[in-house]
Amino acid sequence: MVFMPRREFLRVGAGVGTVLATSASAWAGVLKSPKPIRPPEKEFIATLPHLMELALLPGLGMGVIEDGKLTWQQYAGVANTATRGPITPTSLFPAASMGKQVFAFGVLLLADEGKLDLNKPLREYLADGAPTGKWSEKITARHVLSHSSGLLNWRWDKDQELTPAFEPGTKFRYSGEGFYFLQRCVEHITGIGYEQWIQDRVMKPLGMKSSTYLWRPDGDDRIVAGHNNDGPFYNTEFAKKLFAIIQGSGKPLGAWRHEEIVMAMEKDKPAGTKLLPNDISPNAAFSLLTTVEDYSAFLAHLASPLEQSLSPAIREQISTPLSHINSALGWALGFGIEHEGTQPRYLWQWGNNGGWMNFFLLHPESHTAIVAFTNGENGMRVIERVVRAATGKDQAAFLYDL
């Protein structure tokens, strides 16, 4: 298996009708500091080794974006406690759920180009493997990206149906499998396998040269191991085997869509074996491998003060919450939204993956952001301290499902 999600996110929030803001224009006027996100002070950085030791955290990498540019980076600790290699700017971190935002941005580009209708039922794009049961015919890309499709996070039983638990658009329920089905729809709309499409449409234009949802020839030398109480580990078997099959097939990467991948990977398995989406990579929901610099390039593009970096429609879509979790948190198209009282409003996402814990926070109005990757199961505790040092406040996002 490849980068399995850590837990089922079965939180069900209040109705989507209770939104946290009416439009992206509501961001104006809330800024009280010229830089709500900034590099932590040197005095705090000096405490990191002690914090990491207390949390049994082997390593971390992080960066701060200001005015749409990566202005600060910090690396500490080791990528693997067995080999003791250091965390460096070239270290590849499993991004876990933070791969969803890169995919969501690509989907919004498709919608901007008129190739995908955010409000069209996904079954009309792809019937094979589509959700079933009551309300399934209503699920759209808008519901998937705002985690209001009603679908569960992942199925773990091959005989279980993918069925919404409530009418799409009425509640919040985090769903990785919804993202994977939308990925399949994108493959059928474009006629291109996911890895090739996301490379061509998002990663290459943004200069994300090290990132992949599949694997890299130099992956073994660069990947950061996850760590739990049993020590370092990787979940790379599926990705490495598929990568080798693709390399030796003579077929272009763009030819490898879901159907071809499943056929190739089930070939040598016992009869009746059925791969579920949470077994498969490339997977928009969790299999992104990336570096601090690459992911910062993505965030910098979103946070850029230049109007031409994003269309007005995409700026609106990623910053207008559609589903509601609690009084401070909601979800826009692809991005978590945090806003409480008169405090600044942020875009955010965590990546919780057992031995890897990651987080980003982006403030569009000031064009600032912070991203942090760690390789230990207690990493989020250290990240919370880092983000507090960078923003001067506690973030409500850390109180949700951690």
Image (cartoon, rainbow, N blue to C red):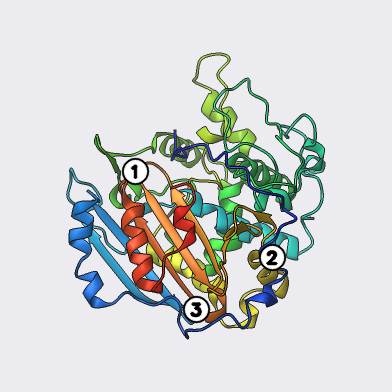
Q: Quadrant of the N terminus?
A: top left
Viewer-side residue, 161 vs 402: 402
Answer whether residue 143 is visible to the viewer in this image: yes
Q: Secondary structure at mark 1?
A: loop
Q: Which residue is mark 2?
A: 317
**For the residue marked with disc 3, what is the amino acid?**
Gly
Which amino acid type is shown beneath numbered disc 1?
Answer: Gly
Q: In this rendering, would 283 be left or right of 144?
A: left
In whole angstroms, how far apart are the C-alphas of marks 2 and 1?
Answer: 32 Å
- Of badges 1 and 3, nearer the viewer stands 1
Q: CA distance from mark 1 to mark 3?
A: 30 Å
Query: Can you give x and y, in whole percent of width and height, for residue 169 in the image?
Result: 75, 48
Nearer to us in this view, 48 or 287 = 48
> Does residue 335 appear in this view?
no
**Residue in the image at 39% along x and 77% along y:** 38
Which residue shows up at 57% across the image and 67% down it?
Answer: 339
Callout 1–callout 3 Cβ contact below 8 Å = no
Residue 355 is tagged as: 1
- In the image, is 78 to the left or to the right of 305? left
- Tell me, for residue 37, which label it has, or none: none
Q: Is residue 197 above or below residue 64?
A: above
Name the outermost residue toward the bottom. Answer: 34
Determine which residue is flagged by label 3: 68
**SS for dot 3:** loop
The amino acid pointed to by label 2 is: Gln
Q: Residues within 10 Å of mark 2 (few under 14, many from 20)?
A: many
Kindly state the secondary structure of the residue where label 2 is placed. Answer: helix
Give the crowd class for mark 1: few <14, some 14-19, many >=20 residues within 10 Å.
many
